[in-house]
Amino acid sequence: MLATTHRLLRNVKSFAWRKLRRRSVPHALVLMYHRVATPVEDPWSLCVKPDRFDDQIRALRRIADIVPLEQLPATMRAGSRSRPVLAISFDDGYLDNLTAAKPVLERHQAPATVFLATGCIERGEPYWWDILTDVVLRTDGLPGRLRLERDAGAFDWQDETLAKSPVLGHPGRRRLHAALWRWLAALQDGDRRGD
């Protein structure tokens, strides 16, 4: 009971501080997207479906001023009655940023900044995490045992149910995907690619 009371008081204090701060300190919001697509698998929930993205931008346009990212510092505002200011950004530079997001942004006159991963563009390769998703979550007949070795260490996995697992939705595949992702994320880029 005492812990709940302390938590409630802390939340009320935090809310009051944020409200007071909003009145006196200029503020803005940056919304970061990755993809506007409907993939078969989206293990990290990076995708927003195109129709949902359209709904989001329409709603944001009604309640806020959407400005280019580089103009955000100059347009931040203080005051509880001022219209919110926000910028939209896309990380990674997926092709669907151009083919699916751009038409929606143009229709609603909403500027956005796209950050590109030039290394993948230069190599003409997909991102390693997309390759991992394709191999582990979309490939038939995974082996029941897997061992990978790199200078930074080895990866061992054994799950005999994988050999007969369905391609979509198998929990063993999801566990393997998450474990491989953690191992690969810790490697240098060259080690991941096997250079």
Image (spheres, rainbow, N blue to C red):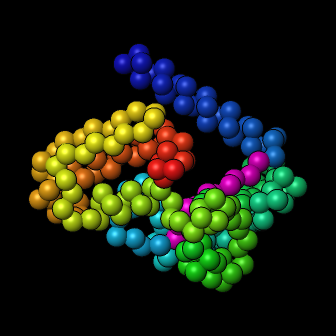
Q: Is residue 175 visible?
A: no
Which x, y percent locates residue 73?
A: 84, 52
Which image quadrant for residue 93? bottom right
Residue at figure coordinates x 73%, y 37% from the top left: 20
Residue at figure coordinates x 73%, y 71% from the top left: 111
Q: Is residue 134 visible?
A: yes
Task: Please name whichever residue, 52 or 91, is drawn nearer the observer in this view of the structure.
Answer: 91
Q: Please give left or right for residue 164 compared with residue 113 in the image.
A: left
Q: Please give left or right for residue 164 compared with residue 74 in the image.
A: left
> Does the stretch in magenta take in 80?
no
Q: Please give left or right for residue 24 compared with residue 169 in the image.
A: right
Q: Please give left or right for residue 148 compared with residue 6 in the image.
A: left
Whether residue 160 is situated above or below residue 100 in the rendered picture: above
Whether residue 88 is situated above or below residue 36 in the rendered picture: above
Which x, y percent locates residue 85?
A: 75, 59
Q: Main secondary structure of the magenta part?
A: strand
Task: Please name whichever residue, 80 or 33, is drawn nearer the observer in this view of the structure.
Answer: 33
Whether residue 187 is situated above or below residue 79 in the rendered picture: above
Whether residue 5 is situated above or below residue 83 in the rendered picture: above
Q: Which residues are magenta?
A: 27-36
The quarter in which the N terminus is drawn is top left
Task: Please name whichever residue, 27 or 155, is drawn nearer the observer in this view of the structure.
Answer: 155
Which x, y percent locates residue 128?
A: 47, 56
> Does the stretch in magenta take in 32?
yes
Task: Please name whichever residue, 73 or 127, is drawn nearer the observer in this view of the structure.
Answer: 127
